[in-house]
Amino acid sequence: MRHAYGRREVLRGLQLDLRPGVLAGIVGENGAGKSTLLKILSGELRPQCGTVRHGDRFGYCPQDVVVNDALTVRQHLELFRVARGLSDLRHAGEVMEVLRLSEYADERAGQLSGGTRQKLNLTLALMHDPQVLLLDEPYQGFDWETYQRFWDLAARLRDAGRSVLVVSHLAYDAERLDELWRLQGGVLHPATAVSA
Amino acid sequence: MRRHLRLYVTAARFDLVEHARNRLAMVLVALFIPSWISLAYAVIPSRPVAFRLRATGRLLAPAGDQITQITGAINAVTLITGFMMFAVTFSGGRFDRRLAMAGYPRIHLVLAKTTSLTLASGTIAAYATAVICTAWSPRQPVQLAAALFCGAMTYGALGVVFGSLLRREVEGMFALVMTSLVDVGLQNPLASGGTKSAAVQFLPTYGTMQAATAAGFTHTPLPSGLAVQILWFAGAALLGLLAFHRRTKDALTTRPPLRLPWPPRHRQPAPPGRATSTPR
């Protein structure tokens, strides 16, 4: 796919094939086009050239926290449960337990700390147990313990056959990933370096 | 059918919760409406203001404080609903998109927003009419409330349009206030003396002003005024709907727009890079 903002070409022709049971990462400098790539993969943005195909349901965690400040955590879950036609919130409950979000169920999103808002942002992306996970800087604002739990969760999902794609400007956790690519010059290159 | 009902009821419920938690709007409803309407009555002299009501051609001479209460009420209800809808549209645009992309049908979201706008407009219009009725007795209070309701709905829809198109909160508030200032200011009989200019017919609350004035000081029903206002609401709502549709569309499920068969190139394109993952 290719994409440009005005005269600035951000993606210059890349192909990405994400298979089941893989925990993959994409790193790149600020402005390299990582978020643009994820927006295209999630359907938020249409590429100027190219197509995206998802084999099954997917979950997308945007880089910015996209929640409604007036609603509580529980109300968010109810709204997205109805949106996704889920019969219960069992899986959402499991994710919340892992991220230690359950204790904030009745708090309004606007009153949560930055890290807790990000936990909600992530839970909304994972609550329907998607086959493909697209996560844009998913651990922003997490404390160290939550950060570790996030990676444990990502590994569990990978082991359960889910495809997980994590996009970040840093590659500190390259050893946790099955595959790592660097987005540079609008194309993807295989990468193994520890820092981007 | 039950699924549609559940989708609609859930969206409407949380939409109303969001409005109810807009504290500034609640304070404005509770305090600004009675304060503004009562001040207009207390401060403006009661001597008659003669002007011709355009819709009926009839010469009216209502008390200055009473006609100012009506224009003040129009001003207050339209600004409050405009502000309420602008606030939720502006802050909730990306959230609506996330919901729509998660599978929430947009038609249910739109119906829910229309329901909360209707309930808010109805409540505020009834409240403003009741406040006016404590000072004097309009000839047709039901028509007065209906006129205020239609004006409030119109500005609510304009709030959605501004909330969808403008990028900064202050721009939206400025746009709403300036629109109302020009709209109500040019029509105010106290200022314009019932101007003969045909331009006022194209102002956003022309229908409301005509119907509300007729309701205050005549026994003549004026459905045409309400009809004009409903047309304004329909136009603004259509614009709001288009903006909402554009903001919440999913690029994976909608057809691409007509484009050149090649991408814009300003430099030598890189060869396509291929990244293929392999399962563990």
Image (cartoon, grey):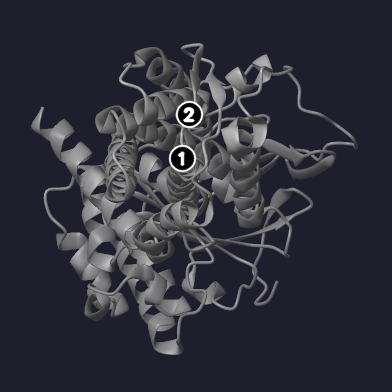
List x then y, in percent, for residue B37: 43, 52
Could you tell me the amino acid type at mark 1? Answer: Ile
Instruction: Residue at 14% x, 61% y: name it.
Output: A90
Instruction: Identify whether B54 is placed above or below A166.
Output: above
The percent position of residue B196, horizontal first and vertical second, equals 66, 17
Q: Which image quarter holds the C terminus of chain B?
A: bottom left
Relative horizontal placement of residue B173, taking residue A107 as reference (left or right): right
Can residue B62 be seen by looking at this rendering? Answer: yes
10 Å crowding of disc 1: few (<14), some (14-19), many (20+): many
Left or right: B251 in relation to B219: right
Q: Is there a contact, CB below 8 Å, between mark 1 and mark 2? A: yes
Q: Quadrant of residue B214?
A: top left
Say above or below: A7 vs A48: below
Query: How far apart are the alpha carbons under marks 1 and 2?
Result: 8 Å
Instruction: Give residue B209's mark.
Output: 2
Residue designated by label 1: B74
Residue A43 makes an appearance in the image: no
Crowdedness of circle 2 by 10 Å Cα count: few (<14), some, many (20+)? many
